[in-house]
Image (cartoon, rainbow, N blue to C red):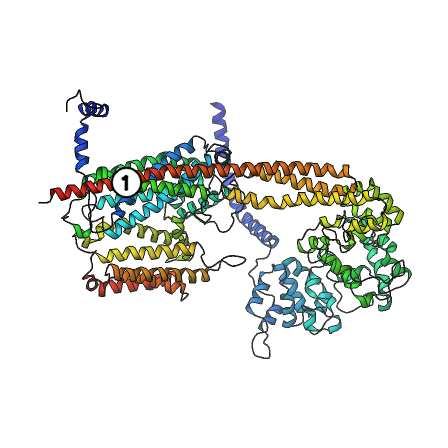
Amino acid sequence: MSTANATVPERLFGWLDERFGVQKLVDWAKHKEVPVGGHSMFWYYLGGTTLFFFTMQIVSGALLLMYYQAGETTSYESIRYITTKVPFGWLVRSIHCWGAHLMTVSLVVHMFSTMFLKAYRRPRELTWVVGFCLFGVVLGFGFSGYLLPWNELAFFATSVGTDSVKSVPFVGEWMLEVMRGGPDVTINTLYRFFALHVVILPLVTVGLIGVHLAFIQVQGMAPAMKQQTPDRPGLKFFPDFMMRDALIWLCCMIVLAVLVFQLPYGPGVPGIDWELGKKANPLAPAYPGIKPEWYFLWIYQLLKEFPPHLFGMEGPQAALILVNVLMGTWALVPFLDRKSRAGKPSPMFTDLAVAALIFLSYLTLKAWDIGGHLPAGEPDPKATAWVCSLIVLGVSASITIMRMIAYKARWFILSMAALLQVVLNGLAGLDYLIAGAIALAVAVVGVLALGDRLERGEAI
Amino acid sequence: MIAFALLFAVVSAAEPKLAKAAEVEAPKAEAAKAEAAKAEAAKAPPKDDGALPEAVEAFFEKKGEDGKPVLSAAERALVKKLPLHTREKLGQAAADGRVRSPDHLKVLLSLELSPQSADLIFTDNCVLCHSDPGHAKRTRFSLDPKTAGTPERLNLKSMLSDAHFRRGLMCVGCHGGKTTDLEMTEEISQGWPDKNMRPYWIPQFCARCHADPTFMRNFNPSMPTDQYAKYQESRHGELLLKQKDRKAAQCVSCHGLHGIRGPKSRKSTVHAQAIPETCGHCHADAKYMAGYKRDDGSPLPTNQLEEFKKSVHGKALLEKGDLSAPACNDCHGNHASQPPAISSVSQVCRTCHVMNGTLFDGSKHKLAFEKHGWPECAKCHGKHDIEKPSIDLISDAKDGLCGSCHDEYSKDNPECNKGARYFHSTLVELTKVQKAIPPVAEHLAERGLDTEPILISAGELDEAIMQARTRVHTFDKGGFDVGATAGREAVEKTEKLIAEAHAERAFRRKGLLASIGVMGLLAVIIWLKIRELDRRRAAERAQNKP
C-alpha cells in the first residue's frame, strides 16, 4: 500500500509503528488464541469480569475521593454529603458498594471454577498462587473500606473484627495496636485504613494483576483436562474473545445499573448492607447482631462455634489457627494435587472443592441465623442449625446426583464427610467441633481405604 | 590542718569508751526491742485464720434425725465469709443460747446477710429470739410467713430491708426495752395501748419522730415533718381521729409495718407505681367501702382503680413506667388526702397541664362552665377514666362531645357548632397527612432518596398539630388558627418536598432506562459483530479444509 493512498488511521498506525514497532504487538495479538472444547467457554470470562469490576471500583473510588474527607468530624459527614447533596453522589457510592460485592462474587466463582477445572495444574501453579494473593487483597479492601463511612455499624464491626487479631500467639497484642493505631479503634484506625484502602492495596493489586496477566500471556489460558493436546484451533483472542468479553462486561454494567437504582443501599441482608445509619460513637454500647461482610461470615461463625478454651489455647486462637491452615492448604492446592500435575484426573480435589463449598455455606447460613428467628429475643441457635443443615443437605444432595449423572463422578468421600458434620451438628444436635472431628476421622479413613479405588473412571 | 588533727585525736580517744558502753547497752536494747514487738503484736488486729467459734462449730457438728449434719458446707462457707468480729458476736450469741440451735442458725443464714446486717442482727436479742423456729408462731419472724403459718407482718426478710431498721432504729426503738434484754421485760410494750385502741394511737405514735424537725434532721434533712398535721386535716384523719372510725387509713395502712421502705424504692407500697394498688386495697373493695358516702349523699364508688388503670394516666404510669404520670396522691394529696372539690379540680389538672388551663381561662367557655357549675377539665375529659383525647371528642356530631352539649345548651347559636366543626375538620385533615408521611418517607429512603428535609418538615407538622390541639381550649377560631396555620404551612412544605423526591426518583428511573437502552444497543451491535465474526471463521475453516 502506498503512503499516498493510506487513510488517516493507517497513517497514524504507520507513524507509531515506525517509532515503537507496534506491528509486532499486533502480529502477536493476531496469533493469541483461547483454547476451545472440553468445557464451557463461560469459565474463561470470569477473570475478565473480575477485572472489569475492579476497574469500576477504581473509577468510582476516585470519584468518591473528590468529596470524601477522612477525619473524626468529616468522614461520616462527607459520606452523608456525597449521598444527599453531591449530584449523582448516591449513584457513585452505590456503584462502589455494589461493585465491591459483585467483584468479590466474580472472584470467588473464578477461583472455584479454576479449582474444579484444575486450571491451576502444571505449569500454572504460580498463576493460582498470585490469584490467591489477589483474593486476600480483595478481602483486605473489603475490611478496610468498611470503616471509612465512620458510622455505628462500621465502628463496632471493625472493633470486633480487629479484636480477633489479639489471639495470634506472641505478637497478637502488638498486631492489634499496629492495626488500630492504638489499643482501641479510634480515628487513627480510620486514617490507616484509609491509606491502606486508597493507596497501599490498589498499588499491590495493580502489581499482582500485572503479574497474573503476564503469566497468562506467557503460558496462555489453561486448556480443558480432556484437551491437553488440542486437535482443533482455538478462539482468536483479538477480536473474537475480546468482543465476547466486552458483551459480558456490558451485561454486568446493566445488572449493576439496575441494582444501583433498585436497591441503592444493598438488599438489606446483614453483611450486604451499606445504609449509613448513625455516626460512630465510641462511648455508645455495642448493639447485638453486628455481623461482618458476607465473605467474612464463615470465620465469624467459626469463632462462635469454638469454646472459650481448647487444647490449652484460647478458643479464638484455635479458630484462627484452623482458618490459617485451611487457607494455606487452599493456596498450596496446585502443589498438593499430584494427579492433575501429571495430567491425570484428580477427583479427590474436585470433591475437596465441593466439601469446601458445603463447609463455607453451612457456616455462612448459620451466621445469618436463617431459620432461627423468634418473634422476640435472640435467635435460637438450635433452630438455626436445624434449618441450615436441611438447606445444605438438600442442595448438596442435588449437586451430588448431578455430579453422578452428568460427570459420572464416584468420588464423594470429602464432600460426604463435610455433609456428615452438617448432619451431626444440625440434625443430631452434636457440638460443631465434635461433629467436625468425627467427619475428619471418617474422611481420613475413607481416603486411605477407598481413595484410589474410586478414582478409576473419573474424567477430571 | 591543726583543727583536723585535734578532732582526730579526740575521736580516737573517745572510741574505746564508746565501745565499752555499747557492750553494756546491747542486752538492754534487745530486751526493749522484744518488749516493743510484744506491745506492737498486742496492738495489731488478731490474725483471722477463718476458724469458727466453738459454740458455732458445735452447731455444724450436730446431726439431724436422718444422721446427716443439719448445716451444710455451703452454710459453713457463709459463716466463714463474715468478718472476724461478726463471727465472734455470733459465737457469743450461740454460747449464750440466744442462737439456740442449728435450725435457728440455718434460718438466719438463709437471709444471706451482708456483714453489716449480720452485725446488727447478732446483737439484737429481739430479732434473735423472735426468729427461733421454736418460738411461738403468733410472734415469730419467719422467712415465708405463709408456709410457716406466722403473721404476714412478721416477714423476716422484709423486716431486714425496713428503712428504720437499716438506719439503726431497732425493735426497741418502737417497742421499748433494750436490745440486750433476754426476757420480755415490763418496759417492753409498756406504752402500747390495747389492740382495739391501736389504730387511733398509731398516727401520733409515728409523729413522735416524724413531726419533730430537729430529730428528723439527723436522718433526712429534706424530709417533711408536717405529715401528722396534714393527716389530722385529711378525710382519713377526720374519720379516724374525730369520728373514731377504725377502718379509716392511718400510717400503717399505706406504709406497712415492719417492711417500710422509702417512696423511691420500687418495692415500697408508696412507690408511685404501687400507690394505685395501695389506695385500691380499700377503695376498690366494695364490701370494705360500703356505707361511705360522698358529700351529696351518694355512695362512694369503688371503681376508681379499675378506671384509672384504663386511663391515659394509668397506662403511662403502670404500663409505660412514666413516673411523671399522676397516681392517686398527685391529685388527692398524700397525707392531706381529700376529694378535690368542683372549684379545685381544674386547678389540680393545671399543675401539669398549664397551657391548657391558661387558654381555657381566657375562653368563652369559662363563663359558661361557671354558670352551670361544671368542673372545668373533668366535664369533658372525665376523672379517673381520662382517655387520650381523640379528635372525635370535639366533633359537632350528635354523639360528639361538643355537638351533644351545644345541641342542649346553645341551640340558638349556630356559631358554636360551626366552630366545633372547623376545629374538628382541620385537625382531621392535618392528622391524615401526619399519618401518611412516615410510610412515604420510608419508601423514598429505601430507594436512596434524601428524606431528611421531609422528616424535619414532618416534625414541624407534629409540633403544629400539638399546638392546634392545645389551642382548641381557646374555643376561638383566631386562637386555634395560630397552631392550625402553622400546620397547614408544614403540610404544604412536606408535600412539596415529597413531590420533589418523587420527581428525583422519576428522573433516576429515566436515567436508568436511557443508560440501559444505550448499553443494550451497544450489546446488540457487539453480538451481531460476534455472529458475523463466527460466520467468517466458519467460512475460513471450510476454505482451509483439504
Write down the residue under mark 1. B528
Looking at the image, residue A305 sits to the left or right of residue B22; the answer is: left
**Residue situated furthest left in the rendering:** B546
| Label 1: chain letter | B
When the figure is inspected, residue B147 is found, relative to residue B340, above or below; the finding is below
Q: In which quarter of the image is the C terminus of chain B?
A: top left
- Determine if residue B490 is in view: yes
Amino acid bearing label 1: Leu
Q: In which quarter of the image is residue A242?
A: top left
Residue at position x 26%, y 36% from top?
Answer: A210
Q: Where is residue B221 in the image (x, y as percent from the top left)?
A: 77, 47
Q: Which of A347 and B158 is in front in this view?
A: A347
Looking at the image, residue B244 sits to the left or right of residue A94; the answer is: right
**Residue situated furthest right in the rendering:** B242
Q: Position of residue B361 (x, y in %)?
A: 83, 41
Residue at position x 43%, y 54% from top?
Answer: A367
